[in-house]
Image (cartoon, helix red, strand yellow):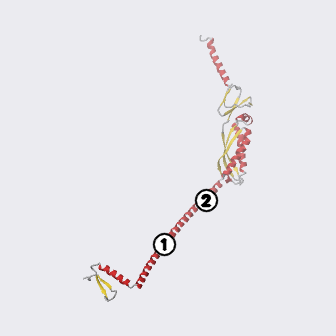
Amino acid sequence: MANSPLNKRVPITIAVVVLLVLIGMNFFKTVPPGRVGVATLFGNVQAKGYMQGLHIPVNPLYRWTMFDARQQTHLETANVPSQDQLQTKLDVSVQYRIIATMAGDILEQTGDAAKAVEVHLKPKLRSLLREQGKSIKRAEDFFQEATQEMLQTGLTDGLRDYLAPKGIEVSAVLIRDISLPPFIVQAIEQKKEREQAVERERAELERVRTELQQHVARAAAGREAAEQEAARKRILADATAYEITQINTAVAQNKAYIQLQSLEALKAISKDPASKIYFMDGSSPSPLPLMHLGDPQK
């Protein structure tokens, strides 16, 4: 039974099945997400591109080239001359994608996606950078916002117009960094340092001016206070002088005023039991008292 015809057919059947599976696998093609497949048959590019997904049936003799149709970024660094004959280093980013429906044309005329970027995008970008730089008067103008916007707009429009027929769609060109010639950078830094020094001196002058104003204000306040004090003293002196004048006038006009004052003095003296009072010239109509404060010391 070991050498029966059935046992001999099993390996043959397995081999046939495997062969059919291998052949059948060539009749369908799966294109990954974001890619487009371009088929060639005996060196001839098939006009129709195969978008992402499963495709059945396909010619098993096709040879496949995959293009990445997703958003890509190309980084470029170039020295850009301005009208002052100085070169400024620019770092730019180009955002682009392969036009899926033109993948076959790209393969036939240029090659794969990397080859298309190398042949079309890079040279045109460098050419546009040089052309745009010729419209800028001075190297330091690259730092102006208006200049950067002009550069980005000019580069984007120029690349779009040139690359669209080549199968590359450009969405934006962005300036990442600007590096001026070293001596200009040094001059700008020195200028900035001078401006900062001027600002410091201006701040110091402002501080001194403020302090002087404060001193002047304090001096004015002191002068005003002194004037007020002098005026007060003058008023008091005038009042005292007026009082003396009034007393003198009263004495001159009324002789009894002295007698009245003498009586007031006697009244005050009489309240002290230790005092002794002597009258000089008792016959005088206005005797003046003398006060004896007691016996002399023994």
Callout 1: 10 Å neighbours few (<14), some, many (20+)?
few
Measured as percent of width and height from the top left, residue 199 is found at: 59, 60
Q: What element carries label 1?
A: helix
Measuring 54% from the left and 64% from the top, which residue is drawn there? 210
Measured as percent of width and height from the top left, residue 29 is found at: 67, 28
Q: Is mark 2 on a helix, strand or loop?
A: helix
Measuring 61% from the left and 59% from the top, which residue is drawn there? 195
| Whether residue 30 is situated above or below residue 248 in the rendered picture | above
| Residue found farthest to the top | 1
Measuring 30% from the left and 86% from the top, which residue is drawn there? 279
| Whether residue 282 is situated above or below residue 146 in the rendered picture | below
Q: Which amino acid does label 2 sit on?
A: Glu
From the image, tell me which residue sits under label 2.
195
| Whether residue 284 is situated above or below residue 38 in the rendered picture | below
* Gap in angstroms between the C-alphas marked 1 and 2: 49 Å
From the image, tell me which residue sits under label 1.
228
The quadrant the C terminus occupies is bottom left
